[in-house]
Amino acid sequence: MPKKTPVRQYAALPIDLRSGTVEIVLVTSRTTGRWIIPKGKPEAGLPGHEVARREAFEEAGLIGATARKALGTFDSVKGMGTVDQPVRVSVYPFRVDGDTADFPERGQREILRASFLESLMLLSDGGLISLLLRYEDELVDLLPPLDKRGGAR
């Protein structure tokens, strides 16, 4: 049986520093309820970092900015009914600057702000966990800078 070509996805790694500590914002998958980071398929005319930013808003109501360069990629499997589809996910650091209660997938997912260690315990995708561990000491430095008004740009 031939191997399936991985489907591309772009993910935001939402990091909220507003409380004075590093919080990673996780959401639940709509199908399995597992804790994940916001991600979605490529969209025509949008670069990966913009897709990731849009997904953070649509899935969790997050406002902020994504780094233009991906932190890295990981391979995963997305369950699609009775068929599993390989997925290659590019992860973009996302600086959370605010959030809103009015967003497209409101009520469809749970949202959680977790410490780095809590995130590692809640996430179930080994590829994402490995990527986070590889960049643990650099995550904050890889976030896009704040603009002169204090907001993410």
Image (cartoon, grey):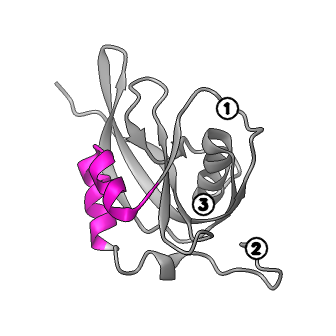
Dot 2 lies on which element?
Answer: loop
Does label 3 or label 2 sit earlier along the sequence?
3
Quadrant position of residue 5: top left
The residue lying furthest to the right in this view is 149
Closer to viewer: mark 3 or mark 1: 1
Mark 3 — residue? 49
Location of residue 82 with respect to 119 vertically, above or below:
above
Query: What's the amino acid at mark 1?
Result: Arg
Please provide the residue range marked out in magenta. 114-134
Mark 2 — residue? 151
Query: What's the amino acid at mark 2?
Result: Gly
Local crowd size for mark 2, using a 10 Å CA cut-off: few (<14), some (14–19), many (≥20)? some
List x then y, in percent, for residue 35. 40, 40
Does label 1 or label 2 sit earlier along the sequence?
1
Local crowd size for mark 3, using a 10 Å CA cut-off: few (<14), some (14–19), many (≥20)? many
Dot 1 lies on which element?
Answer: loop
List x then y, in percent, for residue 74. 32, 54
Q: Is residue 42 left or right of residue 76?
A: right
Query: What's the amino acid at mark 3?
Result: His
Closer to viewer: mark 3 or mark 2: 2
Q: Is residue 118 magenta?
A: yes
Q: Does the magenta stretch include residue 123?
A: yes
Distance from disc 3 to disc 1, alpha carbons, whole Å, reads: 22 Å
Mark 1 — residue? 106
Q: In this view, does 19 lie to the left or right of 136?
A: right
